[in-house]
């Protein structure tokens, strides 16, 4: 079984890489895009105009942060965007998704996920802590080896 972890500067770049793997024949079920979000300890610091220092909204009139999408709900029909802390076990569809999974979580939650998938914890921790933001492309495949996956990503 091949396991590949690759770091990207943002979610879009990681999703583009994931979609290129799907187009090259890698089953979408083998691909997981993990997007780093600030942990609760890091929190966002607001300003007078209701934006944090990165220009993202911190809240709204009804106390809902409008800058992020919901992290998955029971009635969420997309089924592709979840929070690593609340992701449901199993799937309700036939498992033949044509889009890779996308999850959002803290660096610690992402580290736990990649380690559970067979990536060396120490090297993953070093990579994630150096980046502090961005997205991780995680591929675990029974049918394609790591060198083939890297070749597909290089195209």
Image (tube, rainbow, N blue to C red):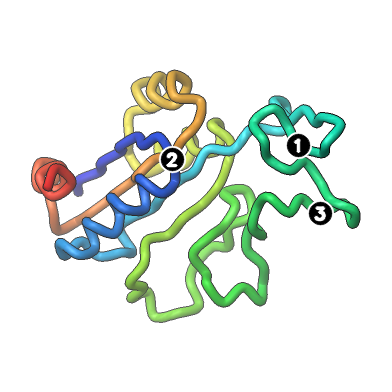
Residue at 33 percent of width and 72 percent of height = 98
Q: Which mark is residue 26?
A: none
What residue does disc 2 label? 10
Residue 87 image offset from top left, x and y in percent: 58, 57
The residue at 68%/40% (across/down) is 56
- The residue lying toward the viewer, choosing from 124 and 102, is 102
Q: Looking at the image, do the residues carrying marks 2 and 3 touch, with CB atoms under 8 Å apart?
A: no
Q: CA distance from mark 2 to mark 1?
A: 20 Å
Q: Is residue 136 left or right of residue 66?
A: left
- Of residue 91 and residue 131, the one placed in the foreground of this image is 131
Residue 114 lies in quadrant = top left
Residue 51's disc is: 1
**Residue 55 in sight:** yes
Earlier residue among tags 2 and 3: 2
What residue is at 62 percent from the left and 48 percent from the top?
85
Q: Please state the horizontal and vertical placement of residue 118, each as a whole percent of the image.
A: 32, 39
Residue occupying the far right of the picture: 61
Disc 2 or disc 1, which is closer to the eye? 1
Which mark is first along the chain, 1 or 3? 1
Q: Are marks 2 and 1 in contact (CB under 8 Å)?
A: no
Give the farthest residue toward the bottom. 94
Instruction: Say which element carries label 2.
Output: loop
Between the residue at mark 3 and the residue at mark 1, the CA separation in whole angstroms equals 13 Å
> Left or right: 114 with respect to 142?
right
| Residue 89 picture quarter | bottom right
Q: Position of residue 145 (x, y in %)?
A: 12, 47
Real-space Cα separation, disc 2 to disc 3, in angstroms: 24 Å
Instruction: Using residue 100 as the reference point, say whether residue 91 is left or right of it.
Output: right
Q: Secondary structure at mark 1?
A: loop
Can you identify the residue that label 3 sits on? 64
Residue 15 sits above or below residue 90 on the image: above
Q: Residues within 10 Å of mark 3 (few under 14, many from 20)?
A: few
């Amino acid at each position: 079984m091949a396991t590949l972890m690759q770091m990207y500067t943002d979610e879009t770049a990681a999703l583009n890489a994931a979609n290129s793997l799907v187009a090259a024949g890698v089953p979408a079920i083998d691909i997981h895009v993990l997007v780093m979000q600030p942990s609760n300890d890091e929190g966002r610091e607001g300003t007078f105009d209701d934006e944090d220092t990165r220009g993202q909204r911190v809240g709204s009139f009804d106390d809902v942060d409008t800058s992020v999408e919901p992290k998955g709900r029971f009635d969420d029909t997309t089924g592709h965007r979840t929070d690593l802390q609340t992701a449901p076990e199993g799937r309700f569809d036939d498992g033949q998704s044509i889009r890779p999974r996308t999850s959002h979580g803290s660096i610690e939650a992402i580290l736990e996920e990649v380690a559970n998938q067979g990536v060396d914890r120490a090297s993953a921790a070093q990579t994630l802590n150096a980046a502090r933001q961005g997205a991780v492309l995680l591929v675990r495949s029974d049918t394609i080896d790591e060198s083939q996956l890297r070749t597909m990503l290089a195209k």
